[in-house]
Amino acid sequence: MDFRRLEVFCKVYELRSFSKAALQSYLTQPTVSGYIAFLEDKFGAKLFDRLGKEISPTKAGETLYAYAKKILATKEEAERDINLVLGRKKGRLKLGGSTIPGQYILPSFLGRFKALYPNCKVILTIGDTKQIVEMTLNGEAEIGMVGARLNIPKLNFEPFTKDELILIVPGGHPLAKKAFVDFDT
């Protein structure tokens, strides 16, 4: 069994779209369709119902998805453990960042991280806070960085860094004469 086909199958399942899965997997849509056709042939079962542009997994698709996620997680664990045994600092770090952290804060940290661990592949996905929280909850991201602390019992939210915001006002504005503005008082 080819792991890549399972990874692409999982993308189609999660995104409910062949074309979106192709885009995220850096493949053509016909290649993705071919991977799914191969799996359907291998298992002798239809994995998705296609209703025009809409797709939904069949019972066989639901079952395969559950096992595919376990297989892929086990493969990643094996790769990580083998690299540890061999003394190689190698692996893959999947991060999610909401817009501001993902575009402005994380890149400098990731640059330093890559300098320390050049053999570690870093995958950064940028989305809105809700998407990043969902990715972290369902294991698509190992770590998420968002700009807000939310009350979600299954996740720990820890401060990572402080961001300085600069207030700008026109020259004639009453706040323009102040050296510091404290909105708490």
Image (cartoon, helix red, strand yellow):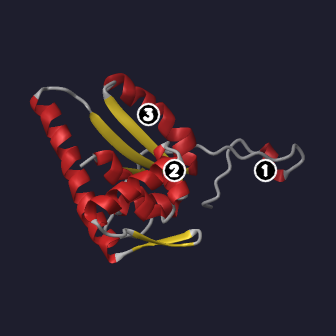
Residue found at the very far left of the displayed protein: 85
First in sequence: mark 2 or mark 1? Answer: 2
Picture coordinates of residue 26, whole percent (x, y):
49, 42
> Is residue 119 among the parts visible in the rendering?
yes
Residue drawn where x is 36% and y is 70% of the image: 46
Residue type of the residue flagged with mark 2: Pro
Residue with the mark numbered 1: 175
Left/right of residue 17 with respect to residue 68 in the rendered view: right
Q: CA distance from mark 1 to mark 3?
A: 34 Å
> Is residue 149 among the parts visible in the rendering?
no
> Is label 2 in a helix, a strand or a loop?
helix
Residue type of the residue flagged with mark 3: Phe
Residue type of the residue flagged with mark 1: Leu
Closer to us: 1 or 184:
1
Left/right of residue 113 with respect to residue 42 in the rendered view: right
First in sequence: mark 3 or mark 2? Answer: 2
Q: Nearer the viewer, mark 2 or mark 1?
A: 2
Does 166 sit above or below residue 88?
Answer: below
Picture coordinates of residue 128, whole percent (x, y):
55, 58
Picture coordinates of residue 102, whole percent (x, y):
52, 45
Residue with the mark numbered 2: 30
First in sequence: mark 1 or mark 3? Answer: 3
Closer to us: 39 or 74:
39
Q: Residues within 10 Å of mark 3 (few under 14, many from 20)?
A: few
Q: Nearer the viewer, mark 3 or mark 2?
A: 2
Closer to us: 101 or 85:
85
Residue drawn where x is 22% and y is 28% of the image: 89
Picture coordinates of residue 31, whole percent (x, y):
47, 47
Residue drawn where x is 32% and y is 53% of the image: 6
Q: Residues within 10 Å of mark 1 (few under 14, many from 20)?
A: some
> Is label 3 in a helix, a strand or a loop?
helix
Say which quarter of the image contains residue 152.
bottom left
